[in-house]
Amino acid sequence: MSWITRISGCFGAVDKKFAFHASDTLRAAEMLKVACEENVGWDEYIHEIKSWLTAQGCDKQHIDEQMKRVQDLKNYLVYD
């Protein structure tokens, strides 16, 4: 399964917040791992996630907030 098909599982179904719940965080870590295995670069990674949020009808403010979370590696780790 391509990493792109995993994007939706990293966001809340209703609130579209990235890795906000523990199960979303685990899926985000798995998505990042698969993207690395598929030799995906950072620019492509960011672009595809932003495109998914846009396709979901999210507004610019929400997209900007979530993209900050996507780019912050601590959001891929459940245990702190």
Image (cartoon, grey):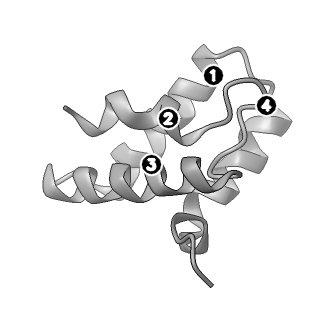
The mark closer to the camera, 4 or 1, is 4
Mark 4 neighbour class, 10 Å CA radius: few under 14, some 14 to 19, many 20 or more: few
Estimate the spatial distance between the alpha carbons at disc 2 and disc 4, rounded to whole Å.
12 Å
Q: Which of marks 1 and 2 is nearer the N terminus?
A: 2
Disc 1 residue type (three-letter): Thr
Check disc 4 and report its element: helix, strand or loop: loop
Tag 4–tag 1 contact (CB < 8 Å):
no
* Mark drawn on residue 9: 2
Q: Is mark 3 on a helix, strand or loop?
A: helix
The amino acid pointed to by label 4 is Asp
**Callouts 2 and 3 close, C-beta under 8 Å:** yes
| Residue with the mark numbered 3 | 27
Label 4, label 1: how far apart the Cα atoms are = 14 Å
Q: Tell me which amino acid carries mark 3.
A: Arg
Q: Residues within 10 Å of mark 3 (few under 14, many from 20)?
A: some
Q: Crowdedness of circle 2 by 10 Å Cα count: few (<14), some, many (20+)?
A: some
| Quarter that holds the C terminus | bottom right
In the picture provided, is 43 more to the left or to the right than 61? Answer: left
Q: Element type at marker 1?
A: helix
Residue at left offset 57%, top offset 62%: 71
Between 56 and 11, the residue placed more toward the observer is 11
- What is the distance, in whole Å, between disc 1 and disc 2 at their CAs? 16 Å
Tell me the element at label 2: helix
Task: Tell me: 37 left or right of 65.
Answer: left
First reached walking from the N terminus: tag 3 or tag 1: 3
Position of residue 76 measured from the top left corner of the image (x, y, whole percent): 51, 65
Question: Which of 75/55 is in front?
Answer: 75
x then y, percent, for residue 66: 70, 47
Q: Is residue 4 above or below residue 42?
A: above
